[in-house]
Amino acid sequence: MVRDPVLSQDHVPPRSWLRRWGRRLLLALLVLVVLVTLAAVAYDLATNGREQSATDLYHGPFVRVDGTTLAYRSWGRHGSPVVLLGGAAESSWVWHDVGPLLARGGHRVFAVDLPPWGYSQRRGPYTMPHWLQLVRGFEQRLHIRRPVLVGHSLGAGVAAAAGLAHPHQVEGVVLLDGDALAFGGDRAWLADLLVYPYYTAVYRLLTGSDWIVGRAVRNAWGPKRAPTGHATVAQFERPFRVQGTDSALKDLVAGGIPGLTLQQLARLRVPRAVIWGAEDTVDSLASGRATAAALRTRLQLVPRSGHLSMLAAPRATAERILRFIRALRNGS
């Protein structure tokens, strides 16, 4: 008797084949999810205790403003005040070259860590009104009157917003490698995806890797060779170990990066300058030109520097800031 190939056990109908491989793929996916979850939990447990209080990681100085402990640095004891505001993932350390140069130029210089960055307390909300409140309170606590505000990257938006909101309390603003524009918008859905144990593991891995952080620093530095040994890279990594930083960044992601619009920038009337690393690939020169046009001022370039112009070319950056301040004094 000839076997019917349709009824043969060696023949598997197409739908049965698809169901069988579908079950196998689903099982493989479930196994992968379990393995990744176990690995994430194990890594989280192995790195527990990595987070510390800001005062354990940085020895100050600190000042208490509206219930928030702010970390800062200062240089110089005489002259008109300059307040330096860093950008995302930056502590006041990034000003360690420019700060003394401005002080030698005849100014009292203060660099403050805006939360959730640097070594300031992770206490929100991370919004423009709250940042302005902290900057104003910081000035009052340290008896700073009518400073020139220099904001780098994200800090450029805070400097411009302060000049717009309180023009009589600001002598001038400098936007350094920052277009001052809002970014991100409402991303609450994205923050909801950052769940334990995956978010914690990825956060600790990315922010604790010399190779990853060093690569980001080199990209932001520009054409000059960045000194990305452990000592330098640690200055960017260590603030991420401040307690509460991981949850603070989730809040920031949900709300987006605060800033202004080009229309708001056009209403700024205090003296202003826009200074940009000529090789900046983080915030493009096109962004700098658009912001400078809105502010009705020219874009000043810092040769052979990228986004971190105050680190890559501190002397040239300080000279441009001092030139702007001298122009204010001369009324030009």
Image (cartoon, rainbow, N blue to C red):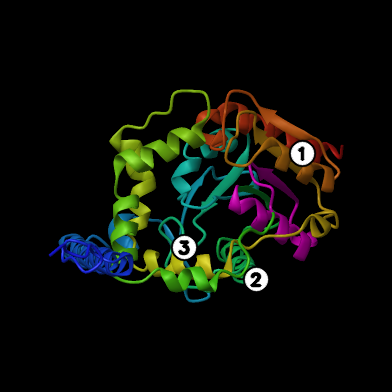
> For the point 74% across and 61% down, which residue is it?
169
> For the point 30% across and 41% down, which residue is it?
210
Frontmost of labels 3 and 1 is 1
Give the residue number, with chain letter if any, for mark 1: 289
The residue stretch that appears in magenta: 153-180
Q: Relative to residue 51, is residue 327 depicted above or below? A: above
Q: Is residue 171 magenta?
A: yes
Kindly identify the amino acid type of the residue bearing the numbered disc 2.
Answer: Pro
Relative image position of residue 108 (x, y in whole percent): 59, 46
Q: Is residue 212 left or right of residue 10?
A: right
Q: Residues within 10 Å of mark 2 (few under 14, many from 20)?
A: some
Give the residue number, with chain letter if any, for mark 2: 129
Kindly identify the amino acid type of the residue bearing the numbered disc 3.
Answer: Pro
Question: Of residues 62 and 212, which is closer to you in this image?
Answer: 212
Q: Is residue 103 magenta?
A: no
Q: Which element type, helix, strand or loop, lies under badge 2?
A: helix
Q: Is residue 270 left or right of residue 98?
A: right
Kindly identify the amino acid type of the residue bearing the numbered disc 1.
Answer: Arg
Q: Relative to residue 225, is residue 52 depicted above or below? A: below
Q: Which element type, helix, strand or loop, lies under badge 1?
A: helix
Tell me the quadrant of the picture where the N terminus can be found: bottom left
